[in-house]
Image (cartoon, rainbow, N blue to C red):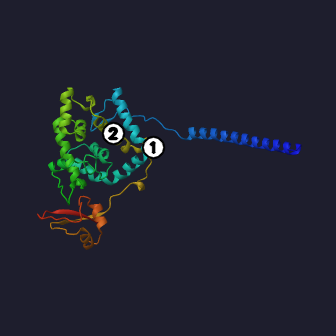
């Protein structure tokens, strides 16, 4: 290697090292700037709980640190699951106007509408245990409370009728326990389940019970959902009126005869199968046998 070649190589290597070092310094500087911007512009806050919280006019004993922490957990979980929170607020505008008057007719506090939110997220879902619909009603419970459930009909998906069945259950639980907090817990755990635990633990209210994790969180989740959905801006949810979901305009027809083919029935009424199914999710097959000539009300789009 000549002296010139050796000198050139040294110079070239020096340039490369300087560039690499400069690039590393620049990257480090950008990283530090990014960290500063992130810290300044992205903050996650602890939830400030209201000083006084009640459920169905029953005060939550927040003076107990154990109760405070359990409620705080549900506020955090439901506030920072932002996508779900927005969906629930949007959907509530569509479905609460159906649920609220039924609760009122049955003398059930309006707060209990959030039980349906906790149960299903205001959707016709099916649980692993086989509970169906907005109110997550088991088949045997649905039949006990007057819902029709068979191969072509499942009224657990009929929002009005399922809400009435839920009201009947809650009123029975309230009559048994004398307060709505225990009635709500019984909706999750069963009336006998709550009764047995009260007797076993020799206490008389939900907040003193030691329960399985699901039921011990259940009422607190309802309370958190109530407060968040009632005061969404307090928790960072900014939703315009135009963003809220609306109920479709419908008309109703009464039938007391069989429907052999739901698609043909839809065509005769200037609509389609999809619309019939969406508006009447309790019709679970392609037909409605109706051998007893029972009168049903079917919703159509108007």
Q: Is residue 129 above or below residue 273?
A: above
- Nearer the observer, 273 or 279: 273
Instruction: Indicate the quadrant where residue 259 lies.
Output: bottom left
Instruction: Indicate the quadrant where residue 170 lies.
Output: top left
Name the residue at the right extreme: 3
The residue to which callout 2 is attached is: 221
Q: Is residue 120 above or below residue 45?
A: below
Residue that appears at 19% across and 59% down? 151
Q: Residues within 10 Å of mark 1 (few under 14, many from 20)?
A: few
Mark pair 1, 2: CA separation: 18 Å
The residue to which callout 1 is attached is: 236
The mark nearer the N terminus, 1 or 2, is 2
User: Secondary structure beneath disc 1?
Assistant: loop
Q: Is residue 292 above or below residue 25?
A: below
User: Secondary structure beneath disc 2?
Assistant: helix
Q: Position of residue 250 (x, y in %)?
A: 28, 63
Instruction: Indicate the quadrant where residue 184 lies.
Output: top left
Q: Position of residue 87 (x, y in %)?
A: 39, 50
- Nearer the observer, 201 or 159: 201
> Can you tell which mark lies on residue 275?
none
């Amino acid at each position: 290697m000549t002296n010139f070649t050796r000198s050139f190589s040294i110079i070239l290597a020096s340039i490369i090292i300087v560039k690499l070092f400069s690039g590393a310094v620049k990257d480090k500087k950008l990283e530090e700037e990014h960290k500063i911007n992130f810290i300044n512009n992205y903050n996650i806050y602890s939830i400030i709980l209201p000083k006084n919280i009640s459920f169905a006019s029953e005060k939550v004993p927040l003076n107990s640190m154990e109760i405070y922490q359990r409620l705080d957990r549900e506020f955090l979980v439901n506030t920072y699951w932002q996508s779900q929170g927005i969906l629930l607020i949007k959907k509530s505008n569509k479905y609460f106007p159906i649920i609220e008057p039924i609760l009122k007719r049955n003398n059930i506090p309006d707060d209990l509408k959030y039980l349906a939110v906790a149960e299903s997220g205001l959707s016709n879902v099916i649980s692993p245990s086989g509970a169906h619909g907005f109110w997550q009603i088991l088949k045997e419970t649905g039949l006990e409370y007057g819902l029709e459930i068979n191969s072509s009909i499942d009224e657990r998906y009929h929002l009005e009728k399922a809400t009435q069945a839920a009201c009947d259950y809650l009123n029975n639980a309230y009559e048994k326990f004398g307060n709505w907090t225990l009635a709500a817990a019984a909706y999750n755990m069963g009336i006998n389940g709550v009764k047995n635990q009260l007797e076993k633990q020799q206490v008389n209210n939900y907040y003193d019970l030691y329960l399985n994790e699901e039921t011990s969180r259940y009422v607190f989740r309802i309370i958190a959902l109530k407060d968040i959905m009632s005061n969404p801006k307090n928790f960072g949810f900014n939703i315009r009126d135009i963003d809220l979901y609306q109920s479709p305009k419908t008309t109703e027809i009464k039938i007391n005869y069989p429907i052999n083919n739901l698609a043909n029935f839809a065509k005769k009424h200037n609509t389609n199968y999809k619309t019939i199914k969406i508006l009447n999710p309790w019709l679970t097959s392609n037909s409605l046998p109706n051998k007893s000539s029972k009168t049903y009300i079917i919703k159509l789009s108007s």
